Image (tube, rainbow, N blue to C red):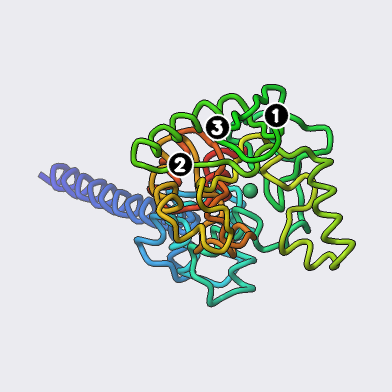
Amino acid sequence: MATRRKLKKQVYFVLGGLIILIVGICFAVKFYKNYQYQQTYEYKLQEHGYNDTEVARILKEFNDEEHLNYLLDNTKDSKIVTLLDEEYYLSKNFYEYISYLNENPDMDLDEIVRNINIHLDSDFYEETFNANTSLDTSMLVNKYYLLDSSYAPDDLVTISQTYSWGEAGSQKVREVAYSAFLDMWNAANEEGYYLMVSSSYRSYAEQEEVYNNYKNSSGERYADSIAARPGSSEHQTGLTLDIFSRTNTNRETFKDSAEAKWLAENSYKFGFILRYPEDKVDITGYTYEAWHFRYVGEEIATYIYEHDITFEEYYAYFLED
Ligand SMILES: [Zn+2]
């Protein structure tokens, strides 16, 4: 009997020991898991002040230590998370957005994104790049993206004098844009309008002459307000037409004509965009030109028309590397 009781005691002892061991292991595991969790960015971001939704959004966007550590090294700012959902947000510009936002804390986030995307944080002509001519009909040429003096399209065709002013053979445009223009001309004509081209392809040298004439007579500031510097004129692409009507070639009044309204509403169907709209002057750097149309192809023109953005914005988001 005594041996049996002794045995029972030993069993209880072993069992008790086991239970203590198991409980101990459980605690250790729990402690270790907790420790591990504290090493995660999820935990660190929460501790930094971001709420659960924000943390989830941040982790969806970034899986690299550099960005996550950057967020932890800087003051918590919910605006940064909102920025990630801006329509034209580009991850490559993240740090630029943040520093621009710090300089302009009251600016709307869509403006922050837009201005950085299209380089509006720099003055016109201050930060310049080579226009990417390999993009062909969707190349961007403006006060940041310039063509060099050697660029000239090799498929220029002459615009018939039926549709253009000037001496015979003086108006030229790229073939693809001419065929689109003719379709547009016919559609307009069916509605009783008679469109006329007043300016088309302009070489680098011609633009240089135009610009320098203004510059020499009235100074650089005036020249910049009225003409593009050589290399920055879209007319050098051969994809741009200044279009008026047969009865109105007046830059002041054309905007109010039925033809100008028809062009603004219908040109995208033929691949053209009103390049310098009235409400986009600060973005394009050009005063409203109701006559200046750029061929970009139907797909791009339709997107730009429907989303009411400029070609600058489209280019930065969809076409630039
Ligand atoms: Zn023009």
Q: Which of the image's four quarters has the N terminus?
A: top left
Residue beneath disc 3: 162
Q: Residue at x 57, y 49 (%)?
A: 292
Q: Residue at x 60, y 24 (%)?
A: 175
Spatial separation of the CA atoms under disc 3 and disc 1? 12 Å
Q: Give coordinates of residue 16: x percent, y percent.
A: 24, 52
Q: Nearer the viewer, residue 317 or 63?
A: 317
Picture quadrant of residue 251: bottom right
Q: Which mark is residue 169?
A: 1
Residue flagged by tag 3: what amino acid is it? Thr
Determine whether the residue tagged by mark 1 lies in a helix, strand or loop.
loop
Picture quadrant of residue 158: top right
Going from N to C along the chain, the mark reached first, 3 or 1, is: 3
Q: Is residue 294 depicted above or below 258 in this figure? A: above
Which residue appears farthest toward the right when viewing the image? 216
Residue beneath disc 2: 194
